[in-house]
Image: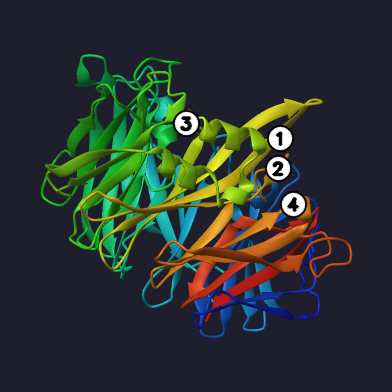
Amino acid sequence: MKVKFYLAALIFLSLHLELFAQEKTINVEITDPTSKGLLTGTIGVIGTVDDGHFLLRAISKGFSLYGKGVGTKGVLVVEKLNQKYGLEKSRKIEDIPMTVMNKAKDKSFEFFYQDKDKDIWLFYSDAFNNKNRLFRKKLDQETLAFEAPILVSELPIVNKRLDRRSNYSIVRSEDNSKFAVFSFVGSKSNEGSEAYVEVFDASMNSEWQMNTSIPEYDKSGPDTKLYGMIKSLNSNGNIRLSNEGVFNMLSKVDIVKGGNEFMHFMYSFYRGIDDPVITYLKNTDKYLLRMSLIQDKNKDVRLAGYYSNDKKLKQIDGLFVQSLNPFTLAIDKQKFIPFSNENKMDFLYQSESYLSGKEKRKIEKGKEIEVPSNTYIKSIFVNEDNSITLASEYYESYTYNGKIYHVNNDFQFTNISQNGEINWIQNFNKQQKDITLNTNGIYQMYESGTIYFIYNEPLEREIRVGQINPNGEVSAKTILKSSKGGELKKFWLVPGTISKVGDNTYLGVAAKLFKERLVKIEIN
């Protein structure tokens, strides 16, 4: 059956929000609803050109929205939109399915990449003669067909459990002069993880590659036990590629299977070595709980995260920061920063007005305040003064009447100086609860030292935008109503679909069952 794609005549609704006294405005434009077939969803923007944008969508009866869910194959569709977001053309990618949970029987989609010449490339993998092969094909932007495939890499399949299909990923350097393709495969029965990392310049020329086995953690120290490194790589901020082409990776593994105590490993892959440099962070009387990494203005790797004084990790007691040489991983400096009661107050409450009577009485009596451990790092930013701002979010889930509810509540912003001092901590109060994770959370945009954000507030049936400036001052306002009479007419923003498509410009999707609306966000 032929599936027709169309966008209704676009009627844009422009909304403006002035934040603080700065000359910055968040402008949001939304389209009329677009009708789609059963279980069809936008995965994201795959390329931006002078006359429009290219989007990737997925269609399948067994494929959930936005590339997540149960694992039958999905049919991918490339769409070209003009500058006014009208649909110009679309084309199915018939021969390369997208697999989620199940491994492909033949070819498998991996990702798209747009190079410095604005050419768009599809990367896909297959298995042939006991080898995994990775290919790239250039998109003809006029016809939406693809040119002949070009072999990128060919790696032996060590055993049938270590098939790399659907396991390749991409990370770009901050200045977009380089990108790395990487794949890590392992299993509990395999002695270590098979690692492939290859760095390319923006013209798709290979600069170096490494294909090796990497050790994992055992109680006696680093050796060849695997305890869950692979899943930890999906966490925010765990992989970075520097502008110089150094690939750094942070991995969290369980010390004891099923336990609450973790070990964190740092890896450095770069040109001229056969195996990565590996170091690991030992727990002492302080237990590292959440960690993230970024490269700072001095080109050092900065680790930042939370620690607990309790081995069972019942609460967060402070911050841990560390500076490392990106090549050798030699420690320049490190510091544990305990939270004072004042720090904890700033972390947990946007202002005193958010305190309940019980909480006020507890504080008045001088009792210790506890920061819950289910606070997760979402992003980390480096500022012009080489301070870093750590953004985290409270999350929990529970079951009620047979349904699993996801709760994403307050956001916390923590600014740490280059010398490892807390400059400020700011809580941002929000309440999100839903049976799906797609519409929860915040999408953050970092521009000139200020973090802008957009999110759904389901209890109030509205979408809000806000910002936190370099001084830690936070503000947010309603920009769209999602109630029946509101501008979005019960559509909800899907933060995971938002992509940066230009200077200060972002594009994403708002959705409800079987329908979508495009959302354009500008900061100017």
According to the image, label 1 marks what residue? 405
Could you tell whether 489 is left or right of 286 in the image?
right
Q: Is residue 339 above or below residue 501?
A: above
Disc 3 marks which amino acid?
Answer: Gly
Residue holding disc 4:
458
The reply to whether discs 3 and 2 touch (Cβ–Cβ < 8 Å) is no
Q: Amino acid at mark 4?
A: Pro
Amino acid type at circle 1 is Tyr
Question: Distance from label 3 to label 2 (Cα)?
Answer: 32 Å
Circle 2: residue type? Lys
Percent across and percent down for residue 383 are 32, 64
* Residue nearer the viewer, 355 or 317: 355
Task: Identify which residue, 206 or 510, lies in the foreground.
Answer: 510
Q: Secondary structure at mark 4?
A: helix
- Residue 206 location, x and y as percent? 25, 60
The residue at which mark 2 appears reads as 433
Question: Circles 2 and 1: CB distance less than 8 Å?
Answer: yes
Per the model, the C-alpha gap separating discs 4 and 1 is: 13 Å
